[in-house]
Image (cartoon, grey):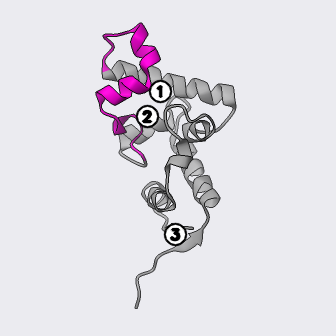
Amino acid sequence: MGKAIGEIINRTQAIDILRSELLHRLDGNTSVCRYAAEHGVMCHGFARWDDRALRGHYDWIVRRHPRIGRKELEGIADRWQLAQLEVSELPTSCDVEARIHDMCRGWDDFTNEDLSRYVFEISGRKFVVL
């Protein structure tokens, strides 16, 4: 018998599943970027960047606070992501970034294989994204 690979879904369906699962986990005071970093899921959010890269992505904050530590920088970056959600009226940081390509490219950063893996790690449901 062959190994079950899961139901086939498209990118939009995978993103809808991830968005729904993430929104159930977020408390309204935490961005997807912080959640992903704290839980080691998906792209790993802020944690995917070393200190230098994170400071580069948020150079406009660092210029105002050159001695800022990583934890504080992540806190401000998290609040910035949440503010972007309010302004854009989009549900997640990944949706905002897919539109503005500021800190990353949001959903556009992920291959279909990535999305399959992320859906499994977040929901426990196995799909193949095509």
Residue that carries the numbered disc 1 in the rendered image: 78
Q: Residue 28 carries which label?
A: none
For the residue carrying disc 3, how many other residues have a C-alpha within 10 Å: few (<14), some (14-19), or many (20+)? some
SS at circle 3: strand
Residue with the mark numbered 2: 34
Q: Residues within 10 Å of mark 1 (few under 14, many from 20)?
A: many
> Residue sitting at 43 percent across and 27 percent down?
57
* Residue at mark 3: 128
Q: Which amino acid does label 2 sit on?
A: Arg
Residue 77 location in percent, x, y?
46, 24
Magenta-highlighted residues: 43-69
**Does the magenta portion include 45?**
yes
The structure residue drawn at horizontal position 35% and vertical position 45%, both measured from the top left corner, is 40
Q: Are marks 1 and 2 in contact (CB under 8 Å)?
A: yes
Q: How many marks?
A: 3
Mark pair 2, 3: CA separation: 27 Å
Q: Are marks 1 and 3 in contact (CB under 8 Å)?
A: no
Q: Point out the image quarter for the C terminus.
A: bottom right
Neighbour tally class for label 2: few under 14, some 14-19, many 20 plus, Cα within 10 Å: many
In the image, residue 123 lies at what x, y percent?
49, 58
What is the CA distance from the residue labelled 1 to the residue labelled 2? 6 Å
- Horizontal side of residue 17 vs 52, given as left or right: right
Q: Is mark 1 on a helix, strand or loop?
A: helix
Amino acid type at mark 1: Asp
Q: How far across and how far down the image is residue 8, in percent?
A: 57, 72
Viewer-side residue, 27 vs 64: 64
Label 2 or label 3, whichever lies nearer to me, is 3
Residue type (three-letter) at the residue carrying disc 3 = Val
